[in-house]
């Protein structure tokens, strides 16, 4: 199966599905939903087969495919996946069918075309797979930009309050970042011998000044996409206005393109510039952790609160990347996966709660657990996973980031640890104000608040809960895939893990 064109098929399949769904009759919305869900399951099955076929001890990049596109510019449809990309592709394959199930009635509530809504979700899946699978810099840039289009329409056409403002802000921020990257891509093509192939460019020797400018162009685009402080302001608006399912993909997957891009492009292609800019990147990560957590504490809108928690989590990922240790790097990549699962679950559950109440304001809840105990329990679990409670998957990744950072930069690790304390504050306060305490009498007058999780919704949350618990106790199958790719990235920038001190070795011997 290693010779099967997994990546090109996985990229094209959702697009074909989107075309099929888009042209289904508008008066048959259930058919559109069923076809979209079935198509997403097909992608999931192919992704599982690809995961099984991946050889963790083999070549760094596997499933490589290359098809000529614009030969005069040195552009080709080149796909390849290392362990980091493979993990993100599996995250996409798992989340999309669950988002489709969770969004079963979202389009009807917006009174817009149901087939178009689910077609947009499949188009989004196509572009997300393409951006992680691309091994050609120009192809990556194309997917990076095209990915904005389906999300723009999902927010602007199917979102809630201030959806058009949020959609335009999301688009403009990402577009400006893309323009910085476009300039850097062209510059890289010129100094790299007029090729966009990643492997060829990774061998090019670039002068110090040029390398720093090229790094900056890519980094700004990725920092906006992630988002890192101070480029984060678009996310609370977009996450707050987007439908819950689209918001789960926005925060769970799309934002990871930023941190993935830093690992795939900034560090290997510009190693000296990466080390030169590392102190500034670490500073932005630490500020983002504390600043976003403080803002999350003061939020009264559930979806904006979850969006701010994600900004804080991305601070941890940024710290793990620029600590330049394999332990912190593995933790950062694992955090990308675990954050997608935990925050994806939190957004979906919050969406279910909002749909029942008809409001996203925390002050409109209070004691909801007395009416919907199962939903309240899932919200509590998702909150505990988001704050990285031991036994949940995010704890492992956060622990690795902090330990790996502490070995090389103790002040950064200590300050970042404050984020854990603040996370407990904003998550537990959110849960207390929405589902615990005295029952808000207004809730008893809302019909939706008398309906606990139905079978479809239980099918949505159950796999995510299972994965979060499984990876919280047994992350080895994932870390075995991630570790070789992270080690190769550290080798690209010439960094090795610090050797343990003599005292540490003696203690270990005892």
Image (cartoon, rainbow, N blue to C red):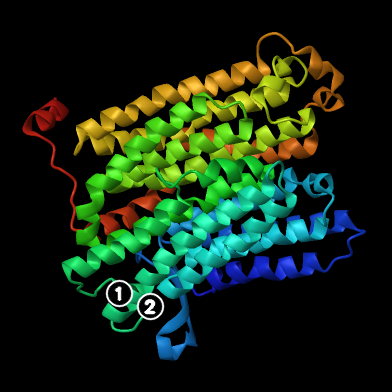
Q: Position of residue 271 (x, y in %)?
A: 23, 61
Q: Residue at x 59, y 67 (%)?
A: 10
The 10 Å Cα crowd at callout 2, few under 14, some 14 to 19, many 20 or more, is: many
Say if mark 2 contacts mark 1, CB within 8 Å.
Answer: yes
Furthest residue to the right?
Answer: 27
C-alpha gap between disc 2 and disc 1: 7 Å
Compared to 154, does 136 lie above or below? below
> Along the polypeptide, which appears first: circle 2 or circle 1?
2
> Disc 2 marks which residue?
196
Residue located 82% across and 69% down the image: 23
Outermost residue, bottom side = 72
Asked where in the image residue 208 lies, by quadrant, the reply is bottom left
Q: Is residue 133 left or right of residue 351?
A: left
The image quarter containing residue 82 is bottom left
Return the mark for residue 8.
none
Q: Classify mark 1: helix, strand or loop.
A: helix
Return the residue nearer the eye: 84 or 193. 193
Q: Where is residue 106 shown, x and y percent of the image? A: 78, 45
| Quadrant of the image containing the C terminus | top left
Which of the numbered marks, if any, corresponds to residue 201? 1
Is residue 436 shown left or right of residue 333?
right
Residue 10 versus residue 238 in the image, above or below: below
The outermost residue toward the left is 502
Question: Can residue 344 be seen by looking at this rendering?
Answer: yes
């Amino acid at each position: 199966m290693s010779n099967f064109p997994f990546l090109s098929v996985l990229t094209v399949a959702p697009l074909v599905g989107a075309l099929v769904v888009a042209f289904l009759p508008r008066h048959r919305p259930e058919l559109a939903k069923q076809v979209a869900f079935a198509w997403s399951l097909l992608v999931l099955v192919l992704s599982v087969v690809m995961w099984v076929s991946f050889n963790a001890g083999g070549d760094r990049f596997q499933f490589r495919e290359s098809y000529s596109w614009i030969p005069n510019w040195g552009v080709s449809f080149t796909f390849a996946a290392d362990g980091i990309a493979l993990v993100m592709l599996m995250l996409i394959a798992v989340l999309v069918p669950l988002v489709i199930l969770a969004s079963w009635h979202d389009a009807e509530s917006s009174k817009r075309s149901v087939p178009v809504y689910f077609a947009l979700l499949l188009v989004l899946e196509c572009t997300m797979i393409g951006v992680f699978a691309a091994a050609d810099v120009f192809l990556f840039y194309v997917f990076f930009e095209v990915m904005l289009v389906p999300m723009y329409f999902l927010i602007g056409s199917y979102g809630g309050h201030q959806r058009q403002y949020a959609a335009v802000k999301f688009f403009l921020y990402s577009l400006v970042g893309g323009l910085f990257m476009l300039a850097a891509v062209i510059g890289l093509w010129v100094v790299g011998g007029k090729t966009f192939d990643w492997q060829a460019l990774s061998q090019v020797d670039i002068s110090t000044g040029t390398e720093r400018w090229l790094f900056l162009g890519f980094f700004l685009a990725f920092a906006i996409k992630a988002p890192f402080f101070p480029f984060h302001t678009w996310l609370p608006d977009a996450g707050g206005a987007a439908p819950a399912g689209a918001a789960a993909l926005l925060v769970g997957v799309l934002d990871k393109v930023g941190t993935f891009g830093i690992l795939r492009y900034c560090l290997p292609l510009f190693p000296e510039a990466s080390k030169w800019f590392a102190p500034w990147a670490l500073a932005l990560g630490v500020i983002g952790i504390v600043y976003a957590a403080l803002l999350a504490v003061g939020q009264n809108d559930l979806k904006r609160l979850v969006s701010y928690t994600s900004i804080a989590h991305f601070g941890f990922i940024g710290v793990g990347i620029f600590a330049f240790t394999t332990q912190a790097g593995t933790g950062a990549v694992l955090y990308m996966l675990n954050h997608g699962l935990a925050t994806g679950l939190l957004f979906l559950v919050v969406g279910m709660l909002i749909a029942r109440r008809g409001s996203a304001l925390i002050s409109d809840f209070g004691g909801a657990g007395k009416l919907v105990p199962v939903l309240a329990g899932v919200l509590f679990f998702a909150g505990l996973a988001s704050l990285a409670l031991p036994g949940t998957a995010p704890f492992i990744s956060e622990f690795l980031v902090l330990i790996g950072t502490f070995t090389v930069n103790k002040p950064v690790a200590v300050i970042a640890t404050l984020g854990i304390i603040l996370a407990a504050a904003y998550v537990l306060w959110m849960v207390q104000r929405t589902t615990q305490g005295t029952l808000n009498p207004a809730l008893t007058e809302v019909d939706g608040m008398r309906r606990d999780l139905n079978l479809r919704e239980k099918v949505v949350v159950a796999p995510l809960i299972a994965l979060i618990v499984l990876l919280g106790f047994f992350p080895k199958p994932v870390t075995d895939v991630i570790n070789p790719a992270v080690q190769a990235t550290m080798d690209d920038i010439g960094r090795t893990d610090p050797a343990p001190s003599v005292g540490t070795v003696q203690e270990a011997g005892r």
